[in-house]
């Protein structure tokens, strides 16, 4: 009976030592997280900016008003370009945020493998 208790105590000690050797709080890749948050915010505000410009050009009948055809062409081209860049920034930012936590998920997966 004493041998069984000693064996169990040794198993518990070994488990505690292994748990203490493991990294208890895996680190987040903070520079990647910071860049991801910045890219996401810039992308979001880029999309909002284009929609806001179109809203302010609209008259009471729902038609966008321009001073000339050149202004129409320039405004639509600029808003389309900013919209595409904003979508890329938004996806890049969200991907960056996800990959900043990827290291934690990888370590957790390896721990229970």
Image (cartoon, grey):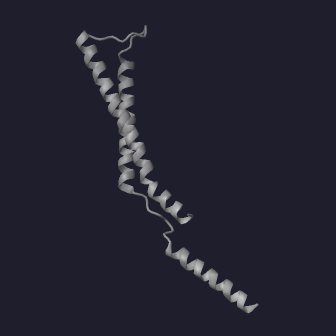
Q: Residue at x 39, y 24 (%)?
A: 51
Q: Most extreme residue toward the front, as rendered?
A: 113
Quarter of the picture holding the N terminus: bottom right
* Residue 68 appears in the figure: no
Q: Is residue 20 above or below residue 4?
A: above
Of 104 and 41, the residue lying toward us: 104
Q: Is residue 39 above or below residue 82?
A: below
Q: Residue at x 54, y 76 (%)?
A: 18
Q: Most extreme residue toward the bottom, as rendered?
A: 2
* Residue 43 appears in the figure: yes
Quarter of the picture holding the C terminus: bottom right
Q: Residue at x 37, y 50 (%)?
A: 34
To which quarter of the image does residue 10 belong? bottom right
Q: Is residue 63 left or right of residue 5?
A: left
Of 23 and 75, the residue lying toward us: 23
Q: Most extreme residue toward the top, as rendered?
A: 61
Residue 75 spot, x, y in % from top left = 28, 19
Of 57 and 4, the residue lying toward us: 4
Residue 52 spot, x, y in % from top left = 38, 24
Q: Is residue 59 above or below residue 18?
A: above
Residue 22 spot, x, y in % from top left = 50, 72
| Total numbered labels placed on residues in the image | 0
Q: Most extreme residue toward the right, as rendered?
A: 1
């Amino acid at each position: 009976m004493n041998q069984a208790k000693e064996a169990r105590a040794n198993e518990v000690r070994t488990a505690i030592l292994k748990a203490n050797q493991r990294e208890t709080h895996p680190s987040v890749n903070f520079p990647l997280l910071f860049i991801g948050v910045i890219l996401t915010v810039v992308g979001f505000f880029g999309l909002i900016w284009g929609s806001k410009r179109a809203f302010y050009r609209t008259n009471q009948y729902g038609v966008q008003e321009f001073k000339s055809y050149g202004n129409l062409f320039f405004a639509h081209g600029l808003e389309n370009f900013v919209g595409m860049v904003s979508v890329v920034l938004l996806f890049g930012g969200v991907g960056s945020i996800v990959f900043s936590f990827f290291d934690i998920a990888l370590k957790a997966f390896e721990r229970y493998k």
